Amino acid sequence: MNIYLVRHGQSMWQTNQTDSKDSNLTALGKIQSVYLNDHIRKVIEEKKESSVIYVSPLKRAIQTIDSLKNEYIVHRGIMEAPFHVASSLPQFEQPHLYARELSKEPNYIKFKVMLKKAIEDIISSEKYESIFMYTHGGVIKTALRIIHDNDCVCYTINNCSVTKITWEKSRWHINFINMISFLPKEYVS
């Protein structure tokens, strides 16, 4: 099973054009999503595997998937947290090697439980070889933290990036994180 975690394009909230976190894409976000969806379309065609596509109900995710022109399922369980995720994570005064700690913040714990349940529901109910989830940076980072069972790590997840994890040989394999090679450099944000 291949899971592709796909981040939405640049949103108006990210560029301070609105106070609403459920905002539309910027002009750049719309361009990014065209490049992203050209790439995803090629992945689907090359793999010739059965696939299903899920999308967060937030505007920026729905607008990002629009140019793909494929059917998709809206799933509330993969929408972004309503709070700043990074401020809920453990923090240290100096670098810690091998530090492993889980967040004690109630909002983040609740968010992780909701996301874990959503992912478990998706992967257990689907018999597809590839699952695509158009979602958000905080969701993708948290999914990786769930796999690692460690909230002391963070990841760079650019707009319209793709992160791929595979269930193979009885364990999760992280194939790549934050892949944006299909985006021209001037469109990376």
Image: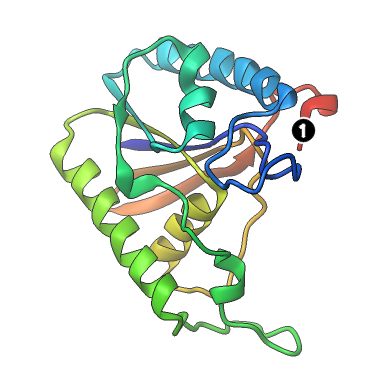
Q: Position of residue 171 (x, y in %)?
A: 32, 55
Kindly identify which residue carries mark 1: 188
Give the residue at x 54% y 33%.
Answer: 60
183 displayed left or right of 49: right
Q: Position of residue 56 (x, y in %)?
A: 40, 38
125 shown above or below 111: above
* Amino acid type at mark 1: Val
- Which residue appears farthest toward the front when viewing the image? 19
Q: Is residue 183 left or right of residue 162?
A: right
Q: Is residue 28 above or below residue 145?
A: above
Q: Residue at x 59, y 69 (%)?
A: 153
- Determine the image quadrant of residue 46: top left
Quadrant of residue 159 within the rendered picture: top right
Q: Residue at x 23, y 52 (%)?
A: 120
List x then y, in percent, for residue 107.
42, 73
Q: Secondary structure at mark 1?
A: loop
Q: Nearer the viewer, residue 172 or 61?
A: 61
How many dots with numbers? 1
Residue 168 visible, this orientation: no
Instruction: Rate crowding at label 1 as few (under 14), some (14 to 19) or many (20 or more) other CA atoms within 10 Å.
Output: some
| Residue 104 in view here | yes
Way the structure is coloured:
rainbow
In the figure, residue 32 lies in which quadrant? top right
Residue projecting furthest to the bottom: 93
x and y percentages locating residue 189 in the rendered image: 76, 38
Quadrant in the picture for the N terminus: top left
Looking at the image, which is closer to me, 24 or 96?
A: 24
